[in-house]
Image: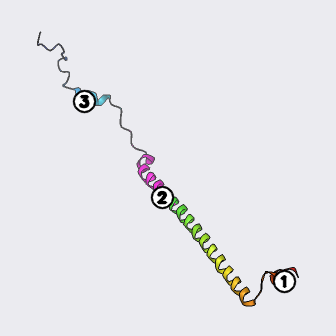
Amino acid sequence: MNRKNPFKTPEGYFDNFAADFMAQLPEKKEKTLLLRLRPLLYAACLVAVCFGGYLVWQNTETQKQDATMAEYNKQVHDQYVDDYLDCAMLDNGDIYACISE
């Protein structure tokens, strides 16, 4: 087994290697305004989605409260009507007679 390295580089190859390599790279383009503002746009979209979700949640809570209040008001109204009819001593026959006249 020969311990000699079969791979060789030309003389002076690595002397200007860094400069030659950098010269072959494409020039770096400057970022446009849109690319610079992209993180801010993402943050604004996230805030808008969160705020929209909050509004939807708040609207459903309000609708639930409105439905609960409507049911409560109906029960209270029915109780007042029942109390009035008891006080007036009207039964179903009297109510039908008043309505039919």
Question: Residue 18: x percent and y percent?
Answer: 23, 29
Label 3 belongs to which residue? Answer: 19
Q: Residue 88 appears at what percent x and percent y? A: 75, 90
For mark 1, what is the residue?
Answer: 98
Q: Is residue 18 above or below residue 97?
A: above
Q: Residues within 10 Å of mark 3 (few under 14, many from 20)?
A: few
Main SS of the magenta part reads: helix
Report the side of 13 relative to 98 (left or right): left
With 1 as the anchor, is 69 left or right in this view?
right
Tell me the CA gap for discs 1 and 3.
108 Å
Read off the residue under disc 2. 50
Which quadrant: the C terminus? bottom right
Q: Nearer the viewer, residue 24 or 71?
A: 71
State the extent of the magenta-drawn residues as a range. Answer: 28-51
Marks 2 & 3, CB-CB < 8 Å contact: no
39 relative to 24 in the view: left or right: right
